[in-house]
Image (cartoon, coloured by chain):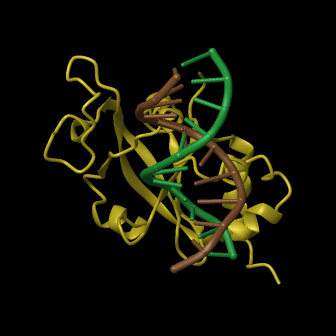
Chain colours: A yellow, B brown, C green
Amino acid sequence: MTPPHYWLVKSEPDVFSFDDLVAARKKGTHWDGVRNYAARNHLRAMKAGDLVLFYHSSVIPSAVVGVAEVSREAYPDHTALDASHPHFDPKSKPDNPSWYMVDLRAVEPLERPVTLDEIKKTKGLEQMALVRLGRLSVQPVTKSEYDIVRKLAKAKRPQ
DNA sequence: GCCAACGTTGGC
DNA sequence: GCCAACGTTGGC
């Protein structure tokens, strides 16, 4: 594996927005609650220092709004082990956890949000998991896709 | 709020 | 191990 790798995570800004991550700047946050195996596998593949596109879902317009970095690599998601927690999963055991989380820290907001609509229309981004596998909440992003999104954010809004 | 896509569960 | 039913995500 040749660092850094690039990723994208989704969050509903009503629940946890990029601004919330910025507000927690020093400390960052536990990216907990992921309960999907494909997403879990991506979490476990993250390395400290990997860059993460932060995407706001379920808002209009949904868009990539910022960049975060992995500040701590995957470790067991304790909310899955806590029976009183809404994310509790009885199948996850302390000695063999099913679910993992990483810590994320804000790096910088994008110059402007890059919307899903724009991503769909941009050459080179057609293969993004965001477009092809709509529901995946943690996804790998290629360097070229990452670079294109950063470039879009620096360019003027289309039309 | 609707509904398509798709992951998960459970009956067989 | 198949597949129908069900639940959830997330765009619109």
Residue A33, above or below B4: above
Q: Please state which of residues A95 and C6 is positioned toward the viewer in this rendering.
A: C6
Q: Residue furthest left?
A: A84
Say which residue appears at 36% left-offset and 39% top-offset: A102
- Is residue A2 found left or right of A131 in the rendered image? left
Residue B8: percent from left, percent from top: 46, 36
Which quadrant of the structure image shows residue A111?
bottom right
Give the residue at x 48% y 32%.
Answer: A37
Which residue extends farthest bottom?
A: A159
Above or below A120: residue C2: above
Given residues A33 and A114, the one toward you in this image is: A33
Position in image of residue A50 (x %, y %): 50, 39
> Taking A96 as reference, is A78 above or below it?
below
Q: How many marks?
A: 0
Residue furthest out toward the right:
A123
Q: In the image, residue A59 lies at what x, y percent?
A: 53, 74
Q: Residue at x 83, y 84 (%)?
A: A159
Closer to the camera in the image, B2 or A27? B2
**Which part of the image, by quadrant, shows the N terminus of chain A?**
top right
Q: Quadrant of residue A152?
A: bottom right
Residue A78, image x and y in percent?
Answer: 22, 36
Relative to B3, say whether A104 is above or below. above
Which residue is at a point 73% across and 79% down the rendered structure image?
A157
